[in-house]
Image: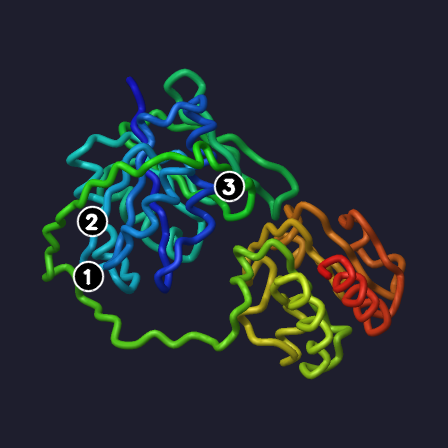
Amino acid sequence: MSHKVLVYAEVRNGKLKSTSGETLAEARKMMGGKTENIHAVLLGEGCEQHAKTLATFGASKIYVVDAPETNTYQGEPTIQALDQIIKKNGYTIVVGPGSPTGRDFFPRLAIRNSGAMLTDVVGFQLEGETIVADIPMYLGKCSKQAVSNAATTFITLRPNVRPSEVADANAQPSVEKFSCSFDASKITAKVVEVRKGSSERPDLTEASIIVSGGRAIANKDNFKILFECADVVHGSVGASRAAVDSGYAPYDMQVGQTGKTVNPNLYVACGISGSIQHLSGMRTSKCIVAINTDADAPIFQKADYGIVADLFQAVPILTREFKKMTE
């Protein structure tokens, strides 16, 4: 059997998410660098503008579903669109991001196609015709390999586990506009309004640099020094569960087992002790810097660099040094 791969390229607020390049890079690796059987799909009015970018990442064909039903994410229209593309073209592997969106509809799409579901993987490859995926277990302390020989396998890749890689900067997109027949009777919910915060910082799950604060930050006003530090390097700010439970930060900033799982290139933990709950959400970060007054804090066992100091003294120094680097 020769595998055909379809990659769901997520678009939000008119912008192509960075996970699109990551999933295409992993798909190319799995296919031995060959791109002829790697295709992508874009959903939403005006989404064709991103086809060129997907082509440079290695998508040899891009389906464009320019339909109002897919403008704002809803599970059912997304599932119907992808389901029709999959069945019409015989895709055997469907890949998407392990984002809130991907985690929401991919399992349902797999059920609709009687397929196998490999979720939150950090890598996947082929051994013969068998799909083998690497999946973290026990809060990231170890990993397992899950295999699939199903007719159709659905995979969600954890964001930021690998960089995007341009396959051909001069590639021209081969675009096919796909007309879906939506079953309105199954679309039982309607999005009437989307409210978002005013922050222009990248989402935690996609940020390459994150500065996080723990209970030692003492109050929500003190998070200002973390925001100042993160803004210098165009990063985002996170928080431990202890900080969130204390009312110092909103829940959408929480990193950990009951919050968001992040994989930045740099994670700066400020005043965070390093509980298992928190480590499970950030332990796969490429580089971890810990700042804590307690030299025996568990976070230092995981950190690549440790600073035994008061965060209110250390973070402003980091901010100044970051500014020198960016000038």
Tell me where residue 81 appears, x and y as whole percent.
20, 49
The N terminus - image quarter: top left
Question: Comparing marks 2 and 3, which lies closer to the viewer?
Answer: 3
The amino acid type of the residue labelled 1 equals: Glu
Neighbour tally class for label 3: few under 14, some 14-19, many 20 plus, Cα within 10 Å: some
| Of callouts 2 and 3, the N-terminal one | 2
The secondary element bearing badge 2 is classed as helix
The relative height of residue 294 versus residue 182 in the rendered view (above or below) is below
The relative height of residue 284 versus residue 153 in the rendered view (above or below) is below
The C terminus - image quarter: bottom right
Tell me where residue 193 appears, x and y as whole percent.
30, 76
Residue under label 2:
81
The amino acid type of the residue labelled 2 equals: Ala
The secondary element bearing badge 1 is classed as helix
Q: Are marks 1 and 2 in contact (CB under 8 Å)?
A: yes
The relative height of residue 62 versus residue 276 in the rendered view (above or below) is above
91 displayed left or right of 275: left
Determine the CA span between mark 2 and mark 3.
26 Å
Question: Comparing marks 3 and 1, which lies closer to the viewer?
Answer: 3
Determine the CA span between mark 1 and mark 2.
10 Å
| Of callouts 3 and 1, the N-terminal one | 1
Q: Residue at x 18, y 45 (%)?
A: 177
Disc number placed over residue 69 in the picture, else none: 1
| Of callouts 1 and 2, the N-terminal one | 1
Residue 33 vs residue 310, the one in the foreground = 33
